[in-house]
Amino acid sequence: MTLPLAHMLIVAPKREVWWIGAIEALVILNALLLTFAFMTLIERKVLGRLQLRYGPNRAGPFGIIQPFADLIKLVRKAPFQPDRLIHPALYLGAPVLSATMAFLAFSVIPWGGGWELYGYQIDGQVVNVPISLVVVFAIGSISTYGVLIGGWVSESKFALLGAMRTGAQLVSYEVALALSVLGVVLMARSLSLTEIVAAQHRTIWYVVPQIVGFGCFAIAGVAEVGRAPFDLPEAEQELVAGYHTEFSGMRWGLFQIAEYVHMITVSALMVTLFFGGWLFPVLHRFGPIWFVLKLAIVLFCFIWARASLPRLRYDQLMNLGWKVLLPIATVNAVATAFFVVLR
Amino acid sequence: MSAGNILVWIVWFTAAAGCIGSALAVVALRNALFSALALIGNLVSLAVFYLLLSAEFVAAAQVLIYAGAVMVMFLFVIAYVGWDLDIAWTGGPSWQTLGGIVAAAALLAELVVVIVLGAANDLKHSNKIAVDFGDPASIGRVFLSNHLLAFEVISIVLLVAAIGGVILGAQRRRERSGGIR
């Protein structure tokens, strides 16, 4: 074996066998889809409760099969498209790219400590790369194109404005987001999410020493996903529905999947970086259960924020990103570097 | 030839074809939007090469910064200027065309010379790379020791660019507000 990639793919020591990774990928993919489906229900339920109404409660007990009703409706819906469409391939490719990249980003998130079953090594994540944190950000930055291209090829002013807002918002907040995790990276001395979780096992959950970084990450994370109060890309009162105005049926569904999976990934990243990932003081073997519990709490906060905070104005959004979050995150990173070197 | 090697060759050929094809598409396509999309493809296939050379961090940084952030700016500008104008480029001054051809030929000659000279000795040692080759720590160490001057000069260049951007933006705002200084 001479070439390095071959080494990485095939003969690396203590790696799980490739088909176990494939099974894990399948399980995670379906778990994400299922989480997405029920997130739509839970979101509507929680929003309803926070606004003193019931939310969906007709399809099945407590409305529990509402997501399946929604799915059947979406799949059966005739896919309308603008008749002055010039680039149909880009129009169809945009939602596909968005959804693919959203799923891809989750593959490096660790959700367990790894187990040994019948002599086979099973890792606690689909792929384990030493620079997984950078990989998540890289894939996230590519997924922007789905929204941008989708907005432009729609040949509609609303969609174009939504796409432009998305571009400006995501670029602005990606900087603050990357800088806010720098403190965690410096403390763990690693870019590997697995290593960062292990480092929190040795010391303390990083939400305590990195409370400032956590605050920046939480705000920039919500902005990066584009959900309320940062939902300017789709702002229905101003832009109809923003970048996906001209998409319908399952094409719109793919954008929706991308948005929710993106939200799940950012929440998982938050759990991993600041709340010890799958760790809990007791019963480490049940890592995935702790991980899902923490994830559920963070996701609930996402919905809570949507229900209680008004949308920012565009200039407020830019001011918050560049003049508040960026300086705070930078000072936090420099201060953390200072303390790490001193210790 | 083992299965791993065949896989590597398939990946390499796909990336090479994508790289050359998208590079041609960048200059050949008339629509600026498609040129920009082809450039993204080019940058991503370069990242695959970095991956094959076991420089994972450089590959991820390439995708994150060039394919991600920089190209979003490109698309942003193209969208504002109007990407569907479809105005064909009629050609710049002839000295520009000549200069472009000369520069491209010089680069090609340079590459051929380097490969011919290097293939004899240096390029054969792909299996003798260190364990920490290309990981963030070793890259940082090289930046802050052997290439410290270049590293610092780049930071000054970026600072100049940032300040220039702020000044340009402030100037436009002053003009808009009726020349109040």
Image (cartoon, helix red, strand yellow):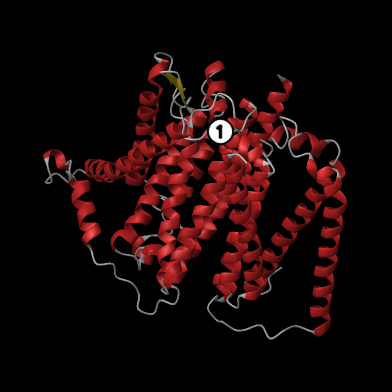
Identified at 40% across, 53% down, the residue is A311
Identified at 39% across, 14% down, the residue is A283
> Mark 1: which amino acid?
Val
In the rendered image, the vertical position of residue B178 relative to residue A225, given as above or below:
below
Depth check, front residue: B29 or A318:
B29
Question: How far from the left and from the top, in percent, is residue A312?
Answer: 44, 54
Residue positioned most to the bottom: B90
Depth check, front residue: B180 or B115:
B115
Residue positioned most to the top: A282
In the rendered image, the vertical position of residue A260 relative to residue B160, given as above or below:
above
Depth check, front residue: B141 or B34:
B34
User: From where the camera sits, is residue A41 visible?
Assistant: yes
Q: Secondary structure at mark 1?
A: helix
Q: Quadrant of residue A63?
A: top left
Residue named by callout 1: A212
Question: How far from the left and from the top, in percent, is residue B130?
Answer: 75, 31
User: From where the camera sits, is residue A131 visible?
Assistant: no
Depth check, front residue: B127 or B98:
B127
Identified at 53% across, 19% down, the residue is A204
Judged left or right of residue B89, residue B93 is right
Judged left or right of residue B29, residue A302 is left
Rate crowding at label 1 as few (under 14), some (14 to 19) or many (20 or more) other CA atoms within 10 Å.
some
User: Exactly how many numbered labels are in the figure?
Assistant: 1
Judged left or right of residue A228, residue B50 is right
Label 1 lies in what chain? A
Identified at 61% across, 26% down, the residue is A188
Question: How far from the left and from the top, in percent, is residue A280?
Answer: 43, 18
Judged left or right of residue A116, residue B17 is right
Q: Locate the N terminus of chain A and report the quarter of the image it occupies.
A: top right
Question: How far from the left and from the top, in percent, is residue A66?
Answer: 18, 47
